[in-house]
Amino acid sequence: MAPQLDGYFKQVDKLSESFIERLGKAVSIPSVSADAARRPDVVKMSEFLVSELKALGAHVESRPLGVQPGTENLDLPPVIVARYGSSPQKRTILVYGHYDVQPARKEDGWATDPFKLSVDDQGRMYGRGSTDDKGPVLGWLNAIQAHKEAGIELPVNLLMCFEGMEEYGSEGLDEFIEKEAKPGGFFEKAEAVCISDNYWLGTEKPCLTYGLRGCNYYSVTVSGPGQDLHSGIFGGSAQEPMTDLVRVLGKLVDTDGKIQIPGINEMVAPLSEDEKSLYEDISYSMANLYESLGSKTGIYADKENTLMARWRYPSLSVHGIEGAFADPGAKTVIPAKVIGKFSIRTVPNMESDKVDSLVFKFIKDEFAKLGSKNTVSVKLLHAGNWWVASPKHWNYSAAGRAVEKVFGVKPDLTREGGSIPVTLTFEKATGKNVLLLPMGSSTDAAHSINEKLDRRNYIEGTKLLGAYLHFVAEEEMKA
Amino acid sequence: MAPQLDGYFKQVDKLSESFIERLGKAVSIPSVSADAARRPDVVKMSEFLVSELKALGAHVESRPLGVQPGTENLDLPPVIVARYGSSPQKRTILVYGHYDVQPARKEDGWATDPFKLSVDDQGRMYGRGSTDDKGPVLGWLNAIQAHKEAGIELPVNLLMCFEGMEEYGSEGLDEFIEKEAKPGGFFEKAEAVCISDNYWLGTEKPCLTYGLRGCNYYSVTVSGPGQDLHSGIFGGSAQEPMTDLVRVLGKLVDTDGKIQIPGINEMVAPLSEDEKSLYEDISYSMANLYESLGSKTGIYADKENTLMARWRYPSLSVHGIEGAFADPGAKTVIPAKVIGKFSIRTVPNMESDKVDSLVFKFIKDEFAKLGSKNTVSVKLLHAGNWWVASPKHWNYSAAGRAVEKVFGVKPDLTREGGSIPVTLTFEKATGKNVLLLPMGSSTDAAHSINEKLDRRNYIEGTKLLGAYLHFVAEEEMKA
């Protein structure tokens, strides 16, 4: 039986101006987590959420995370957890978002004050945090309010987890989630998880995201002389670490992105016909790629291979070199110690440890071929696993039906090339299916200047979050 | 007939404390040319030289060079030119030095105040500019004074040229020298040039330097995307400029310093038996190399090949990459535009223009092999020619005899791997032989912290400069 949503939708439309006002209030609090001096604003933003949630009748707790590691006595911003409803007859859904934002200064090139929501005549709502992630967080609050004011009961018990350090490494969050997912914890009863903190693939068609690549980040250090040398004095008489390093880095990957380290590509899960067919329908074109690249320097000429290369195949990028001359101008230095940085985006079924040992062996073998008296060392700087959920789980089919109801189209089933580490944390801690259900679109410029959220995405997105709760409440237990 | 120098030498010894005092006064003026705020001190240093030279009875002129290019109204420090003697019966020798110094701050790690001459119990005289180049400049003044006070006539007409911008590119000097070398100019009558602004190869044996390598410095730019990309989102779907750049840079030179660009090594002048024999006697050892490298990562196992590699063969160094991630830590960026920097040290008979065209062609060919859609461009950032003088010229034989007289050993005949551009300027402008006659030793740490000049090098060096003038006056005209 399809849920009756018309009353809810009408109420959202009726309240839409007040929802935009709510977003305006949130954007006006510069809750920049990376800047210690802004910490009081991050805390102020947490208090704003607490007061809004209380006004809606939710049970709310502000949970301290202690002192920020590496600081003397700077407290981490609290995690705001809230519960709306606790009926044993209802499904319990856990949602996540973050209330901190990236840094922003008008001087960086913003057309408007980044901490004042500015709505233009196209309905584009500019402001830091509008799409990442204050809009989606408030979407859940808006959904509760519209239900209340329309006199419609929320069909699920809603658990909320809103953190304030996402843009600065989510310090302390993993332990918190693991603890609260255990028996007796705040998230104990969660039956599925929904995270709204990514973006549509384009601007028209909503999507559900079921996979993320992992990332293993390496440094390779080549050193020789005791200190930097002058190339006039020593050039030609000493082996140069930079010569060795560029020769080794040049062996890692070819121009078309094919990783040259033996054994890496062999670990990739084969492409099934079933999976392959998912790519055909996705609303994406090469013009979209060229627009976002700002050039036509793509590797593949077709949509399917391009998307697969980003989502389901590994990639290797060389990011830069530390210790060499990196400034404008000309300096005749022979750097004594240079550190190349590169990373591999990982996918099923690559095992992180095995990737590491193949990388280490390859670098050492290639370096040995050079016959250099310099020394090399390779280090894993950090590793984050890939994640793939089943898009056939009821959590996804419910979300898919909600998208159809609100937008009149089937959503794209997408993966992403980057990582959202909290996804894996929730999956591991709760053992439940995790859904990524984005609100914003590909043109929102999260992390960049002139970040915005379209009015349509915010208001219809609020409808979508509410509709999702209805459909998820009705889905038969399949998992 | 060997010159009678005993009276002069005795007088130098007698005056040695006052010579050290003179150096102390000079070091106490922080004439840092790179720092606009120190410009008054650079001028003060020029005034100190003028007043000392006048007191010795020299004709002195302080010549303005106009406003420093790139500044509003910052005057360049003047060139101090002086003449001591103008007898038509005597030879005229032109000497060059500079009175400005490198920057220095106690906080950089100096054991003593860099602008206060501190003499330790080993006779090491620490202070910025002690060896580079205030000691050698004052050496000429000391030589004049000792002659005067011993009642010995200076056997040559001495022309002096002391500049105040050497450590900041010798702005304006080339044009000045060219003008003054012409008929009617201050340097018109110069018959040979002597520059004391380099160093002994070691610490015990003096040397005469007859060659310098040139330097052609290049940038190679690879660009593709319109802006930096996130490797999570785009890795695998776009060709990456950094991948292309490291692959091209990796082709330039091998670990043992052999340049891989076809045609470069073929331009190098063949080694004659005569030239080869010069290397055997030079006082240098592999232990010296390893000590200055701070490692045993030399390319050759023997002294001769090591020195030849530094002095008479070309070398190629990769200095770094601009535009890529160069900081500590891990950043998952795909840089949109990366600029590799490398330079080739040039030697006889490499033609600068031909080197450029071989480099440009090689880079373009290697890039074409990659099959990349990114774009590449190569630029020459600057070029300075190599220089080689004949060590058989009377200017050198006179200096060699002076070294034997003062130090009791034949000097090493050396070349240097780096460039001293003013050498070429003097040679071209005057058409005369140029001799590099160093005063300081290899351990003096010019440009570094704890710069020093050994008391022995300063006092015996003053004797050497005076003795050189006597021998050069007596040498038969051969050239």
Image (tube, coloured by chain):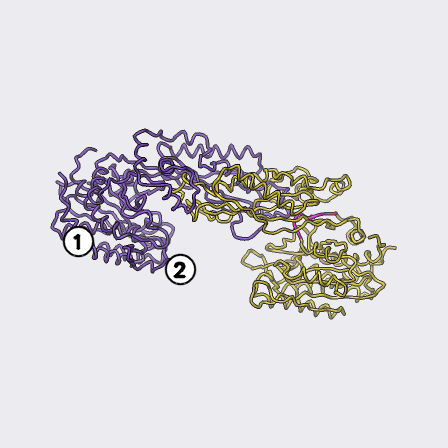
Chain colours: A purple, B yellow
> Measured along the vertical axis of the image, is residue B41 above or below residue A120?
below
Quadrant in which the N terminus of chain A appears:
top left
**Residue B34 drawn in magenta:** no
A9 sits to left or right of B2: left
Three-letter code for the amino acid on which mark 2 is drawn: Glu
> Which residue is disc 2 drawn over?
A107
Three-letter code for the amino acid on which mark 1 is drawn: Leu
Looking at the image, which residue is at 35% across and 47% down? Answer: A169
Q: Are marks 1 and 2 in contact (CB under 8 Å)?
A: no
- Secondary structure beneath dot 2 equals helix
Residue B419 position in % (x across, y down) = 66, 51
State the separation of the CA atoms marked 1 and 2: 38 Å
Chain to which the residue tagged by mark 1 belongs: A
- Give the class, few, some or many, for how many residues have Cα within 10 Å of label 1's Cα (few <14, many ≥20): some
- Location of residue B454 (image quadrant): bottom right
- Please give the range of residues in magenta: B413-419
Quadrant in which the C terminus of chain A appears:
top left
- Location of residue A87 (image quadrant): top left
Residue A392 position in % (x across, y down) = 24, 34
> Which residue is disc 1 drawn over?
A56
Between residue B460 and residue A403, name the one nearer to us.
A403
A185 sits to left or right of B327: left
Residue B25 position in % (x across, y down) = 66, 66
- Secondary structure beneath dot 1 equals loop
